[in-house]
Image: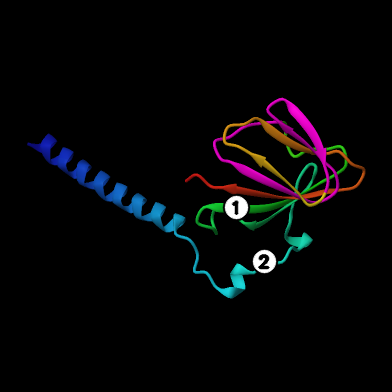
């Protein structure tokens, strides 16, 4: 009888812990209250994150938006943010300034400003700075939650 009581108590505690964890998880994924103040985001280099190859600045990340993210990357000449890779999300790059070398499934092309680059889901892709000035581009990606 004592073992049964301990078992019931343990199950009850686990249920309450799971319920509390579930509620905490829901609170963490609840998007913020959207206002004109937090929906307008001006680039500020002082708020950008320094990387090994330049900077990145999140205009909208997965904690702010419902499905999409928007990031600006600034990459120094001759460098790239990472090696070619793939992921299940589709992705767009939009070149703002500089010259980009775009790799997609074994082929490479060099492009300049006002060019969009599309990466289908699971395609191997990469982007690097092919010029002698900073490369500045936007990354638009759907968040698969």
- Judge left or right: residue 23 versus residue 76: left
Location of residue 67 in the rendering, given as x and y in whole percent from the top left corner:
51, 52
- Residue that lies at the very extreme toward the right in this rendered image: 132
**Residue 138 x/y as whole percent:** 71, 51
What residue is pinned by disc 2? 41
Q: Quadrant of residue 81?
A: top right
Q: Nearer the viewer, residue 108 or 66?
A: 108
Q: Quadrant of residue 64?
A: bottom right
Residue farthest toward the bottom in the current orientation of the protein: 36
Seen at 64% across and 69% down, the residue is: 40
The answer to whether mark 1 and mark 2 are in CB contact below 8 A is no
Q: To which quarter of the image does residue 47 belong? A: bottom right
Does residue 29 sit above or below 118 in this rendering? below
Mark 1 crowdedness (10 Å alpha carbons): few <14, some 14-19, many ≥20: some
> Which type of secondary structure does the marked residue at label 1 adopt?
strand
Q: Nearer the viewer, residue 52 or 144?
A: 144
| Magenta-span inclusion, residue 103 | yes
In this view of the protein, which residue sits in the foreground, 56 or 88? 88
How many C-alpha atoms fall within 10 Å of the one at disc 2: few (<14), some, or many (≥20)? few
Q: Which residues are magenta?
A: 84-112
Give the structural element (helix, strand or loop) at label 2: loop
**Residue wearing tag 1:** 69
Residue at (29, 51) in percent of width and height: 19
The answer to whether residue 104 is magenta is yes
* Disc with the residue nearer the chain's start (1 vs 2): 2
Residue at 13%, 35% in the rendered image: 3
């Amino acid at each position: 009888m004592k073992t049964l009581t301990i078992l019931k108590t343990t199950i009850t505690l686990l249920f309450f812990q799971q319920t509390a964890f579930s509620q905490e998880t829901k609170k963490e994924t609840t998007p913020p209250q959207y206002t004109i103040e937090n929906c307008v985001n001006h680039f500020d280099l002082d708020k950008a994150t320094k990387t090994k190859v330049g900077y990145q600045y999140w205009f909208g990340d997965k904690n702010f938006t419902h499905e999409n993210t928007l990031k600006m990357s600034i990459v120094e000449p001759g460098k790239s943010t990472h090696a070619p890779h793939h992921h299940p999300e589709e992705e767009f790059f939009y070149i703002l300034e500089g010259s980009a070398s775009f790799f997609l499934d074994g082929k490479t092309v060099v492009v300049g400003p006002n060019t969009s680059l599309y990466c289908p889901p699971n395609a191997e892709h990469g982007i690097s700075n092919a010029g002698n000035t900073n490369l500045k581009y936007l990354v638009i990606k759907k968040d698969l939650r």
